[in-house]
Amino acid sequence: MATNLQTVDWVDGKLRLIDQTVLPRELAYLDYEDWREVANAITTMVVRGAPAIGCTAAFAMALGARSIQTEDWQTFRSEMKEIALVTRSARPTAVNLMWAVDRILRVIDRHQGSVEQAKWAAEDEAVAMLDEDLKVNRALGRNGAELLPEDSTVLTHCNAGALACVGFGTALGVVRAAVEAGKAVRVIADETRPRLQGMKLTAWELLQDGIPVTVIADNMAAVLMRDGKIDCVVVGADRIAANGDTANKIGTYNVAVLAKHHGVPFYVAAPFSTIDMTLPNGTGIPIEERDLLEVTHMDGVRIAPQDAPVWNPAFDVTPNDLITAIITEKGVVRAPFEEKLRALSQQ
Ligand code: MRU
């Protein structure tokens, strides 16, 4: 099972990432020792997907701490502040990135006065987050699996699988857990323009597992729903506001509108590290806009007219009234979301 696929790993003091820019052509690994290169790997999407970005950011912090040449606490702490600032700005939407940076800073501050101890603690914390991610995904997978019919076809958008996490996945974790529980699950993968994570990554990793998957272009979902071919939608999330509004890959909102129209349940699967209780609703979620070449070009070849104006937001926000339930490691949450999310976030 590709559930053994480890997207982010710590091997002999180096960060090892699967290079997602070359999949599915090639399964290649890249090793990192320089924290700036790690931050750049997030920006350039060598690693992507909210939980994977979070864990990678933790290692950027740990490697950054290790690179600081001083025994003086004040100097160390102010250099860490700079490293945190740069790491935090690698990508704006997935809150797991900020969550991970803050978590490492908190651990460092627990060792106030001892630079050496703080460096080791940062590394230990980042390593612990790898295992934690896998456990959290398995738990939310089990919670979500109960929602899937015994024999079901699940539509997903983008890649919220093992490749988007340390392993196992969130939306695809739900699928995997259902399969492990003996259910017959098939996946319809939206190709997910413009970067095609659905076709390149979701289809690839499900094929590794032998889970049936069919790729469709993004504009084909409506017809499948109309014809009763989709039992439910399960997607991941990059940031969930306190009221349940959910930022995820651009096009997720389209799918949610279609699901509502056709009476198809629409589930968001995400760990609590993706929930931003500081934002009352989705209007405050920063939406990344990426290079226009992602839209105008395919595999390096221009497909748009030379002077065509282009817009390329990487994410959209699905309003909470389109969401049937949010599947987390602590349980399945249904509307009204805020009170329940707040209570669970304190557990
Ligand atoms: O731009 P990406 O590929 O990082 O976007 C990824 C997504 O939108 C995922 O659905 C989301 O991060 C959840 S991953 C478990």
Image (cartoon, grey):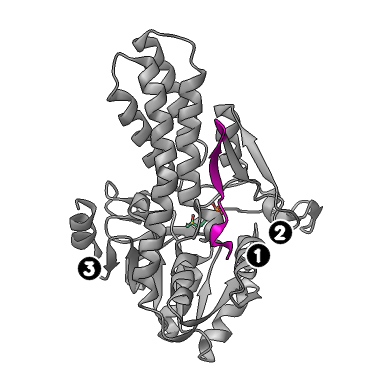
Residue 204: assigned label: 1
Disc 2 marks which residue?
24
Q: Quadrant of residue 281?
A: bottom left
Disc 3 marks which residue?
336
- What is the secondary structure assignment of the residue under circle 1? helix
Determine if the C-beta at disc 2 is less than 8 A from ligand 1: no
Task: Report the number of discs.
Answer: 3
Q: For this rendering, which residue is in front, 330 or 6?
A: 6
The amino acid marked with disc number 3 is Pro
Few, some or many residues within 10 Å of mark 2 (<14, 14–19, 20+): some
Q: x%, y% of residue 322? A: 37, 72
Q: Is residue 120 above or below residue 283?
A: above
* Quadrant where the image shows the N terminus: bottom right
Cα separation, mark 2 vs mark 3, equals 40 Å
Few, some or many residues within 10 Å of mark 3 (<14, 14–19, 20+): few
Q: Quadrant of residue 111?
A: top left
Instruction: Identify the residue at image location x=34%, y=66%.
Output: 327
Q: Is residue 6 left or right of residue 133?
A: right
Q: x%, y% of residue 139? A: 35, 62
The residues colored magenta run: 1-14
